[in-house]
Amino acid sequence: MKGPEGKLTKTKNLGGASAQVENSSLQKTPASEDGGETLSSYWLMKSEPESRLEKGVDVKFSIEDLQAQPRQTTCWDGVRNYQARNFLRAMRLDEEAFFYHSNCREPGIAGLMKIVKEAYPDHTQFEKNSPHYDSSSKEDNPKWSMVDVQFVRMMRRFIPLAELRAHHEAHKASGGPLKNMALFTRQRLSVQRLTRGKDGPCLWTTRQNDCEFTHTRW
DNA sequence: GCCAACGTTGGC
DNA sequence: GCCAACGTTGGC
């Protein structure tokens, strides 16, 4: 597939040089003005980019795999942890999520995607041959949810785990924005919210920069 | 409700 | 492939 619509999200050359926002207060998010009650969030979601069999099924799903999907969109199935599930349910349309590669040779943030459908029941919980089948979940009261995500773009530069950790460690001492980053404080959580500092989320994107927190840029 | 056993996650 | 971290299960 990857036919006509592929261009939407790839190699955007619009805007490019003209945007000259500086730190903080930039990037208003496409927030629909609904009384301003809900601040939009950024998220981090983990997936394994290298092949691994789980109940005979390969669970590999890299950001390249997302990019190769029809309309570059997929459902994010298989989350079986309550805290992670609750974050899925808190996600709102058009919010952005960092795609994190885990359990692989080079762990780190590979790219960006956005939420294109809010939480609905994860059908794989009812599929007996799914690696994520849950016999305790009933169709009339599903336990597990998923969202649909769409590829936005690759990071201009891959951000390795080691680099995130170095910032996290430094911020633990300095009180910086990544001091409580769930990647390190909630080690096995596969869906995470990036917490807000007073100027915004601890980690987010801008038009000019792939990824930044407060005044540090990647 | 405690907590040991167990299973999974995920870096290294 | 090892193994530490940690969430879940289930006996009591």
Image: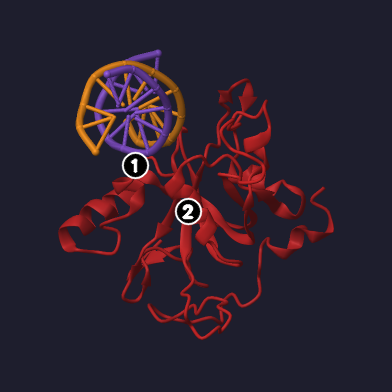
Chain colours: A red, B orange, C purple
Q: Is residue A47 above or below residue A13?
A: above
Residue annotated with mark 2? A86
Q: Is residue A77 left or right of residue A194?
A: right
Q: Is residue A40 left or right of residue A10?
A: left
Towards the viewer: A210 or A188: A188
Q: Is residue A102 above or below residue A167?
A: above
Amino acid at dot 2:
Asn
Q: Secondary structure at mark 1?
A: loop
Q: Identify the residue at image location x=51%, y=86%.
A: A35
Residue A104 percent location from the top left of the image: 47, 33
Towards the viewer: A197 or A81: A81
Work out how far the residue at label 1 is from the one at label 2, CA to CA, in angstroms: 17 Å
Q: Secondary structure at mark 2?
A: helix
Q: Identify the residue at image location x=47%, y=80%.
A: A37
Towards the viewer: A18 or A106: A106
Q: Identify the residue at image location x=22%, y=59%.
A: A171
* Residue A109 in view, yes or no: no
- Mark 2 packing: few (<14 Cα in 10 Å), some, or many (20+)? some
Q: Residue furthest left?
A: A173
Towards the viewer: C8 or A71: C8
Q: Chain of mark 1?
A: A
* Marks 1 and 2 belong to one chain: yes
Q: Which mark is residue A187?
A: 1
Amino acid at dot 1:
Gln
Residue A178 percent location from the top left of the image: 30, 59
